Image (tube, helix red, strand yellow):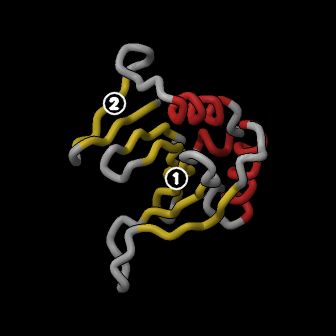
């Protein structure tokens, strides 16, 4: 499933009708197609967030949402834990890990799943 966030409004993206076809969204779909079953059980969704300026894969974990952000340019993949409420310092997210762009989609999917599973984000 894909969702799109723009101007604070969340809406579902339907298949090939209104789904974005930019390189980041294609990359997110490619990685999502090879995610292990444990990630799909965590409610993996592709998110196109215009407000926060990222496209990624969002996992609904017991401790809150975790997003694998697709890289822009030469930036690495980022795995970010988003907070539901800002913490004492006013942060709304914390970066958990970075993956270089040397991996193929299956490698990114495997690294993401293993990191989340080994740190207790996934059951």
Marks 1 and 2 sit apart, C-alpha to C-alpha, by: 17 Å
Instruction: Give how far across and how far down residue 47 sits, in percent.
Output: 44, 40
Quarter of image, res 10: top left
From the image, which quarter does the C terminus lie in? bottom right
Asked whether the beta carbons under mark 1 and mark 2 sit within 8 Å of each other, the answer is: no
Question: Relative to 8, is 48 on the left or the right?
Answer: right
Instruction: Give how far across and how far down residue 35 sits, in percent.
Output: 68, 38
How many discs mark residues in the rendered view? 2
Above or below for 119 versus 22: below
Question: Relative to 56, is 106 on the left or the right?
Answer: right
Above or below for 29 versus 76: above
Describe the element under mark 2 as helix, strand or loop: strand
For this rendering, which residue is in front, 90 or 50? 50
- The structure residue drawn at horizontal position 49% and vertical position 51%, both measured from the top left corner, is 60
Question: Relative to 102, is 63 on the left or the right?
Answer: left
- The structure residue drawn at horizontal position 71% and vertical position 39%, both measured from the top left corner, is 36
Instruction: Give how far across and how far down residue 73 sits, in percent.
Output: 58, 46
- The structure residue drawn at horizontal position 30% and vertical position 49%, both measured from the top left corner, is 51
Instruction: Give how far across and how far down residue 90 sits, in percent.
Output: 33, 79
Q: Which residue is mark 1?
A: 67
Above or below for 58 versus 79: above
Above or below for 2 versus 42: above
Question: Relative to 9, is 70 on the left or the right?
Answer: right
For this rendering, which residue is in front, 27 or 14? 27
Q: Which residue is mark 2?
A: 12
For this rendering, which residue is in front, 61 or 107? 107
Which class describes the residues within 10 Å of circle 2: few (<14), some (14-19), or many (20+)?
A: few
């Amino acid at each position: 499933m894909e969702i799109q966030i723009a101007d604070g409004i969340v809406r579902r993206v339907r298949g090939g009708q209104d789904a974005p076809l930019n390189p980041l969204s294609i990359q997110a779909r490619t990685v999502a197609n090879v995610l292990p079953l444990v990630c799909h059980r965590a409610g993996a969704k592709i998110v196109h967030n215009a407000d926060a300026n990222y496209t990624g894969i969002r996992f609904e974990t017991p401790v809150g949402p975790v997003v694998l952000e697709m890289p822009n340019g030469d930036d690495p993949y980022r795995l970010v834990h988003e907070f539901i409420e800002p913490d004492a310092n006013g942060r709304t997210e914390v970066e958990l890990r970075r993956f270089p762009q040397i991996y193929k989609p299956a490698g990114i999917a495997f690294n993401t799943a293993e990191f989340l599973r080994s740190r207790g984000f996934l059951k």
